[in-house]
Amino acid sequence: MTRRPGRKTRGFWRGRLVTLLISVTSGGVIAGCGFTPAVQVDATAAASMPGTIEAPAAEFADATAAQFLVQAIDERLAIMRDVAAAKWLSGAPIPDAAREAVVLQHVAARARTLGLDPATTQPFFAAQIRLARDVQQRWHDEWKQADRCAPCAEPADLQAVRERIDKTREQQFAALYLLTPLRDDAAAAVMEQMQAAVRRHELPADAAAELLTALRHIVRVAGGPVLDRLRATHVLRIATTGDYAPFSLEDGGRLSGADVELARDLAAHLGARPVFVRTSWPGLVNDLRDGRFDVAMSGIGYSEERAALGLYSIAYHEGGKTLLARCADREQFDTAAELDRPDVRVIVNPGGTNERYVREHVHQAQILVHPDNRGVFAEIAAGRADVMVTDDVEAELQARRWPGQLCRTYPGTLTRSEKRILMAPDPALQARVDEWLAEVIAARVPARQLEQAMRAYVSDNAGH
């Protein structure tokens, strides 16, 4: 389940993800705009074949989407050589105010379709138009100096050139749909790629900063009907942490876990392709507020803070907090009171309900915050921490992984909790999800997927 894929396998997944990114906008000629589709893909047919859409769910889309965005910008600037040649031959001026106004109108319309704010999206494309004019001017200056326009000998068809430009714009929207608003931790990588692109086209160094600034200002429109966007894009954006086995785990660039499989089933039910976007326990609320995902599935429990911003599904798993410690210390931590002693080191992973419970109930013990949710259990096994408060399903999983070393020491649960799907605030989406969940729960699908994920995790991590 968590085996590291080889180089060829990783390349296959990246290729499938690029295809998926294109498919975000492949069905969408904007009514009345006259733009060509980004690629010739039958999105309706793709949505009707859920058995063919499993591969893109295998990895996080964020990094690939960022690369895809910059590549599309780079391609657009490269096309300007043919645009410059067409204008050279016709004697048309480089600025084309009428055409630029139409393009920005189309940008606004496309942004609305994808739930992006038109007012903050247009400046990003307007900046590219200005840079495109600069590239065209550079070509004209070069041809004037040489007294020869090399591409003019075999000029490209202007309409075909414009269709290629339209395609790069749709590719950018496909990436923006997954990236917006741009994360701080992604900005540096995007900036590096943009700097390389502007150098290739001999643009001023500050052009990359101009593009990045405009990109970082793009925001989403608050709320809105998620199901309408699903019908338009055939994509379900699924947030997951990738650090919480057996629900969601990333290893070697590949995602696995019970909630990963459940999310793929949900996407198929909605006639959409599953695209996973990275979130974290400390950042989940902000990602919900920013509209980075349609649903979040990662063994997520209920919290009032999250419920105030989004909607929850019905519960698909019930459990509660319990104690995990070294098996040799079983008798020292078989009651809740024994947790809160001055000589006890309680370890927590930051930002989730585990830490919240400890902060509320532990006042004398030493609290150790460990940033890596996947490595926190090794700290207990190695004797660098004594005990952890965690969900009973995770305690059982780690006891299986560390037989004879780690044990669930509290026989019951300290709390009662439920795992639910967290969603964007769209009651229509919530109704569809709950209807589907009721059916799969009745068929015991989540329970079977959870047990399969636990067995696979223990098998893959035996001896680690």
Image: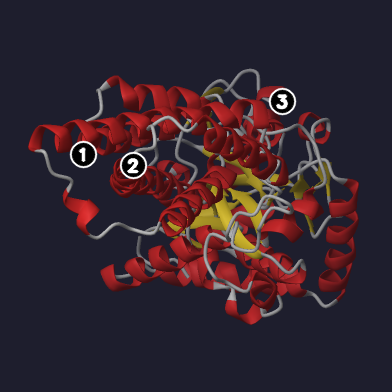
Q: Left or right: 177 with respect to 221? A: left
Rounded to the nearest angstrom, the CA distance separating label 1 from label 3 is 58 Å
> In the image, which is nearer the foreground, mark 1 or mark 2?
2
Rounded to the nearest angstrom, the CA distance separating label 1 from label 2 is 10 Å
Report which quarter residue 309 is drawn in: top right
Residue behind mark 1: 200
- Residue nearest the viewer, comparing 450 with 394: 450
Where residue 439 appears, as percent x and y from the top left, is: 87, 72
The disc at residue 77 is 2
Residue behind mark 3: 361
- Residue nearest the viewer, comparing 173 with 245: 173
Which residue is rendered at x = 66% and y = 32% of the image?
Answer: 118
Whether residue 278 can be seen here: no
Rounded to the nearest angstrom, the CA distance separating label 3 from label 2 is 58 Å
Provide the secondary structure element on which disc 2 rests. helix
- Residue nearest the viewer, comparing 142 with 388: 142
Q: In the rendered view, would you say 442 is above or below 179?
A: below
Which residue is rendered at x = 84% and y = 67% of the image?
Answer: 436
Q: Amino acid at mark 1?
A: Arg
Q: Are marks 1 and 2 in contact (CB under 8 Å)?
A: yes
Provide the secondary structure element on which disc 3 rests. helix
Q: In the rendered view, would you say 329 is above or below 212?
A: below
Of mark 1 and mark 2, the one earlier in the sequence is 2
Q: In the rendered view, would you say 370 is above or below 449?
A: above
